[in-house]
Amino acid sequence: MLDNLKLWFKNEVIEFYCHPDMEGVIPPPIQAGKVIPDWWKKLPHTYNSRDSFGDQSMTAKKCMPLLDIMTLGYIIPLQGDVQVITSPDGSIIKATNPPTMKVAEFHNIEQVGGKKNAPGAPTDPIKFINHWVIKTAPGWSSMFIPPVNHMNPNFTCLGGMVDTDTYPKEVNFPAIWHTKNFDGKLKAGTPLVQVIPIKRNSFRKQPVVREMSKAEFAEIERIRKCQTSRSSYYSKELREPRS
């Protein structure tokens, strides 16, 4: 299975593996580009207006920076169906796990500030159990963030980073629950977190902050003039094509 995953992801920086009993049972991690949010898929490329070049005005569907971050890394999905019930005021939250697998439990709200100050208060934070081990190459960590631009209305997983080169063990995902008076099922495969491998110590901890040089100002002006003389300059001429 491990060899198949390495071929699937086509790199040697990160790999995912699970217990043999879970193979073929739990949804696997998947390239983030294969889990684009529905609102983005449904968005038309243009709207009823004209831009400065006389072309149909573009929607966010044509914004390459938005697309590039949404397709970066991998998505770890919810491992099984779980029924979640919250009270009308959000003070009570319960989860019913599948009969043979735990995929959700809870943190004490005091761990994140208590019922007055915690995000999502008064609802206890939910914790999603992950059965995938993440292993990265030496010197590489895994950054876990909520799936970018997915905007799940019910919960948001908290971000974190783990040195998965020295800690090849399952990492679980605490989340803030948003919806009061909820009684519904979260389906297996629901995107939980976006995993982005990051090389440690690859950049300065303190940013360089300075005045731009004359050459840098001239380059900004050149780019501005190119943008105002031909359409999609960044997307067609400056952006490196993604594989």
Image (spheres, rainbow, N blue to C red):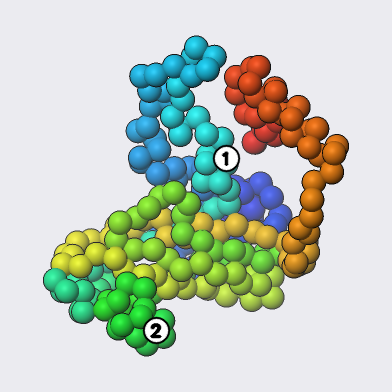
Specify few, some or many for label 1: CA neighbours under 10 Å numbering under 14, 14-19, or 20 or more: few
Location of the C terminus (image quadrant): top right
Would you place residue 125 above or below residue 229 in this image?
Answer: below
Residue sitting at 21 percent across and 79 percent down? Answer: 91
Would you place residue 33 above or below residue 90 in this image?
Answer: above
**Secondary structure under the numbered disc 2 in the rendered image:** loop
Residue sitting at 39 percent across and 63 percent down? Answer: 156
Q: Which mark is residue 17?
A: none
Taking 47 as reference, is 216 left or right? right
Location of the N terminus (image quadrant): bottom right
- Residue type pointed to by label 2: Gly
- Residue type pointed to by label 1: Pro
Residue 79 sits in quarter: bottom left
Taking 6 as reference, is 52 left or right? left
Where does label 1 land, which residue? Answer: 65
Q: Which mark is residue 113?
A: 2
Marks 2/1: CA–CA distance: 35 Å
Would you place residue 221 above or below residue 109 in this image?
Answer: above
Q: Is residue 103 visible?
A: no
Q: Earlier in the sequence, mark 2 or mark 1?
A: 1
Residue sitting at 65 percent across and 29 percent down? Answer: 234
Would you place residue 33 above or below residue 241 in this image?
Answer: below
**Secondary structure under the numbered disc 1 in the rendered image:** helix
